[in-house]
Image (cartoon, rainbow, N blue to C red):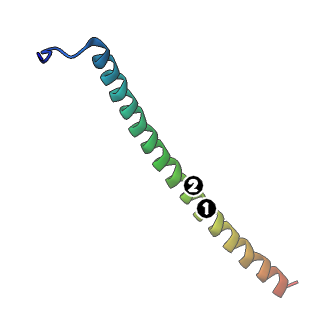
């Protein structure tokens, strides 16, 4: 049986679509990493604010 030298046009289209999907998936992964980092920063800031608020409330309770 003879092997085709040129890939079938449908295979080329599928390959292009697969490459585009892979690129989009990588972009989504990077965006997700960025969102996760942002979320971690927000949690840290919330913890800092909570800690400061607790210190203020403790100070006010000790000095009415």
Residue count near mark 1 (Cα–Cα under 10 Å), binned few <14, some 14–19, many ≥20: few
Relative to 10, does residue 21 appear above or below in the rendering? below
> Which x, y percent locates residue 27?
41, 37
Residue count near mark 2 (Cα–Cα under 10 Å), binned few <14, some 14–19, many ≥20: few
Q: Considering depth in this image, is 56 or 3 the residue closer to the camera? A: 3
Residue shown at 37%/34% (left/top)?
A: 22
Q: Quadrant of residue 6?
A: top left
Left or right of 1? Residue 23 is right
Q: Quadrant of residue 14?
A: top left
Q: Considering depth in this image, is 53 or 60 the residue closer to the camera? A: 53
Question: According to the image, label 2 marks what residue?
Answer: 39
* Quadrant location of the N terminus in the rendered image: top left
Left or right of 35? Residue 2 is left
Residue shown at 25%/14% (left/top)?
A: 8
> Which x, y percent locates residue 54?
74, 76
Residue shown at 67%/66% (left/top)?
A: 49
> Which x, y percent locates residue 46?
65, 63
Instruction: State how far apart marks 2 and 1 are (Cα).
Output: 6 Å
Whether the residues at callouts 2 and 1 have beta carbons within 8 Å, the answer is: yes
**Which structural element holds mark 2?**
helix
Q: Considering depth in this image, is 47 or 37 the residue closer to the camera? A: 37
> Which x, y percent locates residue 52?
68, 72
Q: Quadrant of residue 64?
A: bottom right
Q: Which mark is residue 1?
A: none
Question: According to the image, label 1 marks what residue?
Answer: 43
């Amino acid at each position: 049986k003879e092997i085709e030298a040129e890939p079938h046009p449908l295979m080329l289209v599928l390959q292009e679509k697969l490459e585009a999907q892979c690129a989009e998936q990588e972009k989504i992964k990077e965006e997700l990493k960025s969102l996760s980092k942002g979320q971690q920063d927000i949690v840290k800031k919330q913890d800092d604010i909570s800690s400061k608020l607790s210190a203020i409330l403790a100070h006010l309770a000790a000095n009415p």
